[in-house]
Image (tube, grey):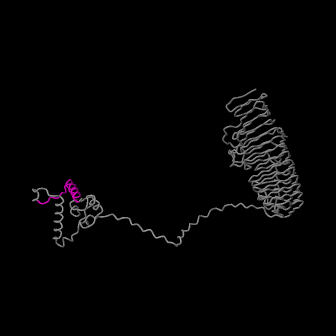
Amino acid sequence: MKHRKITALLCAMALMGTVPSFSAAAANEAPSDPYRTAVQKMKDLEKAEKEKPEDAKESPKTDVPAGEVNYTDALMKGLDLTVADVQSSIEAGTFKNLSPEAPKPVEPEPIVEPEPEPASEAEPEPLPEEPAPEEAAPVKKFIINQGETANTQDTDGAYDNIAYISEKDDENALRIPMAYITSENGKITKSGNTTDVESSRLYGLNAAVLATHGGRVSFTNALISSSGTGSAGAYGYSKSTYINLTGSTVTTEGDHSPGVIVSAKAMMKTVNTQVSTKGNDSPVIEIADGGGILIAEGGSFTASGLRSHGIYSKGDVTVTNSTVKAEKTKAAVLKGNNTITLRNTVLEGNEIYDINPHNIVLFSKDEDIGTMGLQQFDVGGGTLIARKGDMFYVTSTHGRITLAGVTLIKDDPSSNLIIVTGNDGANDWGTPGSNGGHLELICDGQTLDGNIVVDSISNVNITLKNDSTYTGAVTIIPNGEGGASYKTNADVFIAAGSTWNLTGNSTLTSLNNLGTINYNGYTITLADGTVLRG
């Protein structure tokens, strides 16, 4: 191996012109073995080094700059090194310390720390404490405020012929939490006012009867009355709560005092029950925030105060074979993706408070616009009565109105049948310019009379089927807030056997007619400019 190393070094030096000239006498002699020659040269240099005077030995040595390698010197200093070893040591600045006796430079191995012996009983090192998070903005806490109660029935059973009375503020006359009870011929009387109208509306604070947190009660022939402010008649709160009123009477006299009301997914059913409210802001039938289900079969429901609607629903209301009357305000208000279903029922309104009166209103909050949900106003049989104003107003929502064999009465012949438009935002009904109404109107075996008005940011899709007859005009008007036009505004489909009797010039986006149109001298202008005449 040494021979090969030496030979390689000498060849390299020869190519670089650095092979030493050995003695002149040896010039004419036969070439000697390179290995032996190199060894002899090394011995001669060592002998000369020993014979140097002491001062010469201490003379400073000049470093060879990196990159300027004297391979002859290197060869003489370390026969165990390869050319690569020498080059590496020169660049590292250690080549002058090499000698035949010295080991080759070895790059230090990385120090490996011995793994500590596992401590059998040692306690784990405590983790460093997490830095305290920055103080966040306080989160609003919703406190369910139901106040006190004069009487509680929280044990399952039958409680007949019992009277429950409360005369204090913020107190229920009877509360049923988490119990299944029946009550026949009960009398519940409530006086005293609320100190928190909002909690009365949302949670049943100060109600005459409050079923809550899964309480279930069935009243038969009950007499329930309240006279204070913020004092509902019968209130059901929270999921799994259920109230049944059969053959009963419920009356409230104070403001903010609904007749029958549920919230937070509670359920109520009334059968042949009479309900009335006399105060302002006291709907006779109400579903408050969080939704719920209220079913009324038979009976009558009358609201006498201002802004006291016949039905105010944020949930699902079904009324069958009943009469519902609002004497001084709207017949019904449907909010959000919820439903009002009427079967063989008379629903009557008389809006005297609003400057622009409407009888039945469908709307949603701003965040609900553009979400096609389940908002439906579904009427089969019965009668809808508008003593003042337009029959329907649809704004800031997506909804469906279905009319099947319903009698429609409008006392004001100049009022519209349906208005589908945006609004100015005054009633918190969406953002002006983008709060259009979107309505699907289905007329099934229906006769209807009156104009339909839709603005440019809204649309109405009208279907006449099963021998329906519509008498009126359909008009597209500009949006009052200058909002961008919707892709379609008014589309009409007339099935075979159904009829449209025009009472004025009409504008539509599209028309699909398989039935009959009686133009009566008027025209229909389509979005593409087509003008239809009889």
Residue 165 drawn at (x, y percent): 87, 62
Give residue 346's quadrant in the image.
Answer: top right
Residue 274 drawn at (x, y percent): 88, 51
Q: Main secondary structure of the magenta part?
A: helix
**Magenta-span inclusion, residue 6:** yes
Where are the magenta residues, as a range? 2-23
Nearest the viewer among 52 and 227 is 52
Nearest the viewer among 61 and 457 is 61
Residue extending furthest toward the top: 534
Give residue 444's quadrant in the image.
Answer: top right
Residue 423 drawn at (x, y percent): 72, 45
Image quadrant holding the N terminus, namely bottom left
Residue 134 visible to the viewer: yes
Query: Exactly how many numbered labels are in the figure?
Result: 0
Image quadrant holding the C terminus, namely top right
Nearest the viewer among 70 and 41 is 41
**451 versus 251 height, above or below:** above
Left or right: residue 26 compared with residue 373: left
Left or right: residue 48 compared with residue 84: left
**Magenta-span inclusion, residue 492:** no
Left or right: residue 100 compared with residue 348: left
Nearest the viewer among 177 and 223 is 177
Left or right: residue 215 compared with residue 482: right
**198 versus 420 height, above or below:** below
Residue 229 visible to the viewer: no
